[in-house]
Image: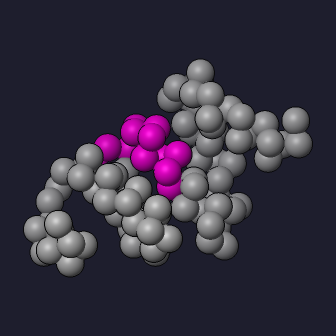
Amino acid sequence: VSQSRYDNFRTNNEESHSLLGYCCYKMQNYTKAESELRIALSIDDDNVTTMYNLAKVYSKTDQGNRIPNLLEKILRLRPNYKPAKKWLAQLSGG
């Protein structure tokens, strides 16, 4: 399904927006990726995978200052989420 056809579909399904956001990230369309991931989080704001993918989008844009807070939120929700722990430790210099 092309992105334009998907845009016309307009779903309120969190998983669909999250998946589309990740696909846009992989295609280096960071503006659309951020938009879709934010929509997904507006539906389910506790999805740590979506948050982590949004942090990855921030790392590719001029929003790196948002990454630590997002990683900390992930770790509050899921303390043993290893990718977030590792990334936060790298940002902290440890």
Q: Inspect this view and state whether residue 42 appears.
A: no
Q: Residue at x 32, y 43 (%)?
A: 44
Instruction: State which quadrant residue 22 falls in.
Output: bottom left
Total labels drawn: 0
Inspect the magenta stretch and tell me whether residue 25 lies in it. no
Residue farthest bottom in this picture = 4
Q: Which residues are magenta?
A: 43-54
Q: Is residue 11 left or right of residue 74?
A: left
Q: What percent of the width, then of the height, locates residue 31? A: 46, 75
**Colouring method of the image:** one colour
Q: Residue at x 66, y 73 (%)?
A: 62
Residue farthest right in this picture = 93
Inspect the magenta stretch and tell me whether residue 46 lies in it. yes
Observer-nearest residue: 83 or 74?
Answer: 83
Q: Is residue 11 left or right of residue 53?
A: left
Q: Inspect this view and state whether residue 44 appears.
A: yes
Judge whether 85 appears above or below 53 on screen. above
Residue farthest left in this picture = 9
Q: What percent of the width, then of the height, locates residue 26? A: 46, 62
Q: What percent of the width, then of the height, locates residue 27? A: 44, 68
Quadrant that contains the N terminus: bottom left
Magenta span: predominant SS is helix
Judge whether 34 appears above or below 86 on screen. below
Q: Residue at x 68, y 32 (%)?
A: 85
Quadrant that contains the C terminus: top right
Q: Residue at x 39, y 72 (%)?
A: 32
Q: What percent of the width, then of the height, locates residue 9? A: 11, 68
Residue farthest top in this picture = 80
